Amino acid sequence: MMFKTENLKALIKGYSIVELMVALAVSAIVIAGTLAGYSVFASQYEVLNKRMEIDREVLGVISLIQKDVMMAGFKSHRSTNGMNPGDVLKKTSATDFSMVFDTQEKEGDPVVRQLVRYSLGPGYTSADGGEIRNKLYRDLRDCDTPTSGCSLANSTSRYSAGGQGEVIMDKIHTFEVTFLNTKSSGKYSGISQIVKINLTVAASRKVQGASGWITKNFKFVSRAKNVSLLE
């Protein structure tokens, strides 16, 4: 069977330049849309990742604060030293509070009286973005003369650098302490049983494409569990 020249030309006919340009334009639009969608997804994933990072860090600090407050005012039956009510749970300022309790670090060790202080350090300028931030300190101190009370003046810190103890959290925007449920009578009259904390923390760095710093706010309460305070 023989093909005519006209039929052969029709069989081997390719795309015209117009058709190729239309195909390229459509492909470019599809690729651009895909890239834009990927950028949005990547930015959202980074924001979510930073929020989870903040959660992990803050939850550990919340657990530590609640554990310390729970011990406030605890007096071991093995200790002959009286507990000064004014030292049990004390708020120096809206960003500085402390508690005193007896503890035994390990089996066989003597009972010692300690003071734990949480305080907000001075503000500093972040290298990434120039924001003003703060550091939260935890100071663990041994009481020098438990028989006469325990305060910053008569206790010795286990840390030397900075004067406020060790940094347990950075990138803080807000740290506000409120004392609640104050006892109205008894030995611990005037002493609060509950500590309420308002804490706002920023992510470790800015997220590309985000409108500003990624921050999360946490509000939590810590309750002293010492029987004497709960009477």
Image: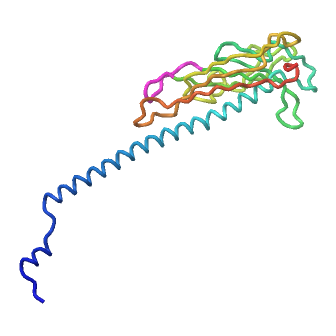
> Vertically, is 4 above or below 200?
below
Q: Please tell me which residue lies in front, 21 or 104.
A: 21
Image point (73%, 19%), residue name: 98
Q: Residue at x 68, y 16 (%)?
A: 178
> Is 123 located above or below residue 204 in the figure?
above
The image quadrant of residue 95 is top right
- In front: 231, or 105? 231
| Residue 147: image location, x then y, percent | 88, 15
Residue 89 location, quadrant? top right
Looking at the rendering, the stretch of residues picked out in magenta corresponds to 121-132
Quadrant where the C terminus is found in the figure:
top right
Q: Residue furthest bottom?
A: 1
Residue 19 point in image, percent of width and height = 17, 59
Indicate whether residue 26 is drawn in magenta: no
Horizontally, residue 114 falls left or right of residue 118, namely right
Q: Is residue 43 above or below residue 162?
A: below
How far across and how far down the image is residue 151, in percent? 77, 15
Q: Is residue 217 left or right of residue 15?
A: right
Above/below status of 54 relative to 175 = below
Examine the residues drawn in magenta and state their main secondary structure. Answer: loop
